[in-house]
């Protein structure tokens, strides 16, 4: 029985060390850590496992969490698509660029609505329900 017990325990790790290092924080207050786990086996080599985690800010609960609450630069670091954690300046530039894209999209939608309204007033298009074709709904001007 003793021999069986020694055989089983030789496969169990003899020591485990976990280190957690803060690598950054985003403007929303979320903190990002690099967690290294080192497992030492009695009869084998040491095995290391590295994970990247985010700890949400105190003001953000699990119910309030959305994927947009993490900056894309930090998301790329968490998922391993980039090696180095982003700097604060990178995150701020990304947020400014995202706001600019949203503004341009809103401007384009407004221009499209104005163009559509103008074409309707000129009689070039008709307003009908999507998927409902009514030939009599549109008649060109001058006839």
Image (cartoon, grey):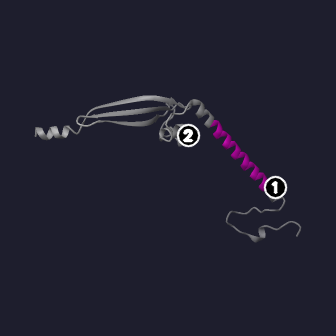
Identify the residue position indicated by label 2 in the image: 72
Q: Which mark is residue 17?
A: none
Residue at 80% over, 59% down: 120
Question: In the image, residue 93 lies at what x, y percent?
Answer: 63, 34
Q: Residue furthest front?
A: 45
Residue at 53% over, 42% down: 67
What main secondary structure does the magenta stretch of the protein show? helix
Report helix, strand or loop for mark 1. Answer: helix
Q: Residue furthest right?
A: 142
The front one of 60 and 49 is 49
Quadrant that contains the N terminus? top left
Eyeballing the image, is 135 above or below 35? below
The front one of 11 and 115 is 11
Determine if the magenta segment contains residue 131: no
Q: CA distance from mark 1 to mark 2?
A: 39 Å
Identify the residue position indicated by label 1 in the image: 118
Question: In the image, residue 137 lies at what x, y percent?
Answer: 77, 67
- Which image quadrant is residue 18 in? top left
- Magenta extent: 95-116
The front one of 12 and 95 is 12
Q: Earlier in the sequence, mark 1 or mark 2?
A: 2
Q: Residues within 10 Å of mark 1 (few under 14, many from 20)?
A: few
């Amino acid at each position: 029985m003793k021999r069986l017990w020694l055989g089983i325990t030789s496969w169990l790790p003899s020591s485990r060390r976990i280190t957690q290092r803060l690598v950054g924080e985003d403007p929303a207050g979320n903190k990002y850590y690099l967690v290294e786990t080192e497992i030492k086996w009695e009869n084998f080599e040491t095995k290391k496992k590295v994970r990247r985690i985010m700890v949400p800010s105190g003001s953000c609960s699990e119910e309030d969490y959305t994927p947009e609450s993490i900056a894309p630069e930090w998301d790329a670091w968490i998922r391993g698509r980039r090696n180095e954690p982003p700097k604060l300046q990178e995150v701020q530039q990304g947020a400014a660029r995202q706001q600019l894209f949203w503004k341009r999209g809103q401007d384009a939608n407004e221009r499209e609505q104005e163009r559509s309204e103008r074409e309707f007033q000129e009689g070039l298009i008709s307003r009908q329900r999507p998927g409902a074709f009514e030939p009599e709904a549109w008649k060109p001007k001058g006839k």
